[in-house]
Amino acid sequence: QLQLVQSGAEVRRPGASVNVSCKASGYNFIGYYIHWVRQAPGQGLEWMGWVNPNSGVTNYAQNFQGRVTMTRDTSITTAYMELTRLTSDDTAVYYCARESLEYDNSGFFSTWFDPWGQGTLVTVSS
Amino acid sequence: SSELTQDPAVSVALGQTVRFTCQGDSLRRYYASWLQQKPGQAPLLVFYGKNNRPSGIPDRFSGSSSGNTASLTITGAQAEDEADYYCYSRDMSGNPAFGGGTKLTVL
């Protein structure tokens, strides 16, 4: 069964760090990028970055450069996202998602996220 | 601000047809995919690529694309379709980008 299972909710003080895990199963883990997306309360989806599970190469959204680190452990098919120097603005649900992509013969590029993890609520409060 | 633009909210009468749109220059070369999100749940893929519906998604969901606009249509909206709908694709730099989302109310 294709699925991503994330670690549980976390509460942190401002200035602290948080590490969220994302366990993949049901597919070839190294064949698909894992992305991290967050959603603040009542807000939309915000892309944070991706990790290539095969090589470990990462790409981070500019808003998170210097504060986020995405890693993976292929032996246990798990991806991780660490966010440092937390503030109350980082209170959100954090999701991991598997990306698929393909080109069609008209030159168009398709990309989609499926499946998604169940989400991890990170609360930053003093 | 998002490089993919969606209407903030739309409503539809039960059983009628509703269309969501997503606009952005990058959609001239990238297909959009569409996500449904119900309160307290993770997003769910409902349509992707030129004409693809994931397994388990009802066939009342369909998609299309023209120029810089992608569309998701629900033909015969049901009460359980009430949710937020997000388009997703790439921006002009090739980085992932989400639309701001459209809240669907089924009357």
Image (cartoon, rainbow, N blue to C red):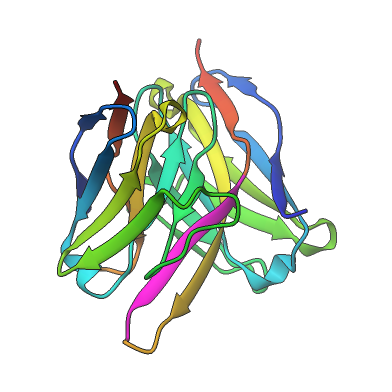
Q: Position of residue B27 (x, y in %)?
A: 23, 66
Q: Left or right? Give the position of B65 relative to A93.
A: left
Main SS category, magenta section: strand
Q: Position of residue A92 (x, y in %)?
A: 47, 27
Q: Which residue is most to the right?
A: A75
At a point 53% along the width and 49% down the height, the residue shown is B57
At a point 25% along the width and 30% down the height, the residue shown is B12
Q: Looking at the picture, does residue B57 appear above or below residue B38?
A: below
At a point 64% along the width and 56% down the height, the residue shown is A71
Residue A108 occupies which quadrant of the picture?
bottom left
Which of these two is toward me, B11 or A117?
Answer: B11
Q: Position of residue A16 (x, y in %)?
A: 56, 27
Q: Position of residue A104 (x, y in %)?
A: 40, 83
Q: Is residue B69 visible?
A: yes
Which of these two is toward me, B6 or B59?
Answer: B59
Q: Looking at the picture, does residue A33 appear above or below residue A37?
A: below
Q: Which residue is most to the top?
A: A126
Q: Looking at the picture, does residue A119 appear above or below residue B64?
A: above
Residue A40 occupies which quadrant of the picture?
top left
Q: Is residue B90 visible?
A: no
Residue A15 highlighted magenta (yes or no): no
Q: Left or right? Give the position of B76 relative to B53.
A: left
At a point 33% along the width and 27% down the height, the residue shown is B14
Q: How many marks?
A: 0
Residues rendered magenta in the picture: A107-116
Residue A108 highlighted magenta (yes or no): yes
